[in-house]
Image (cartoon, rainbow, N blue to C red):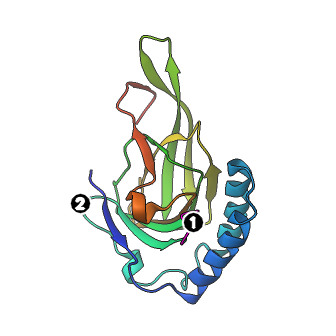
Amino acid sequence: MTTSATVGSGRLTERMTALVGEIRAVVDRGLPPELTAYLVGERLAPHLGDTGLLTGAQREGDPGGYRQHVLHAEHDGSFSVVALVWLPGQRTPVHDHVSWCVAGVHQGQESETRYRLVSDGRTAHLVETEHQTGPAGTVAAFAPPGDIHLVRNAGAATAISVHVYGADVSRLGTSIRRVYRLPADGPR
């Protein structure tokens, strides 16, 4: 499945502008990635589900694949805020990230399967370590390494999540560092 992306899809709402300021205050502290992600997650959570967070254009999906709306990229590249819109059945490949990440479910629900890479030096495969279904309001925060996962909309309605990455996604085009095409234990 492909992903479509828009950069600067409309102006930021007043609520999103406030959230960006809160994120900036955390990121500017220069804390370790895991702690930064945790604290950004705390700032994101109260905004999830608020109808004033995203514009109509920033809530639009794409039948060809989940859609990424890059809402904000900090001028120094230290973080980006992205809205991901998932129509029913849409999913990511199994992947990891270029930086710390915080994901909050804004609308609907998302299913996430996390994996661990196991290698004996000659062959490698993925082992499923966790499966979670997150309703609106759920926040997950993590940092590489150990951030291998697949995200999908297993529900019957559109799901929207707000992601904050510790990188300039507008410049990189994606937060994905590597896609895994290895055999995996467990359901996919």
> Is residue 104 shown left or right of residue 27?
left
Q: Is residue 24 magenta?
A: no
Kindly indicate the quadrant of the structure image that contains residue 104: bottom right
At x 57%, y 55%, the residue is 134
Relative image position of residue 99 (x, y in whole percent)? 56, 50
> Is residue 92 shown left or right of residue 126?
left
Q: Tell me which segment is drawn in magenta.
A: 75-79
At x 55%, y 86%, the residue is 52
**Mark 1 falls on what kind of element?**
loop
At x 66%, y 71%, the residue is 24
* Callout count: 2
Relative image position of residue 97 (x, y in whole percent)? 50, 46
At x 52%, y 21%, the residue is 118
Please name the amino acid that badge 1 sits on. Ala
- Residue denoted by label 2: 64
Please name the amino acid that badge 2 sits on. Gly
Q: Residues within 10 Å of mark 2 (few under 14, many from 20)?
A: few
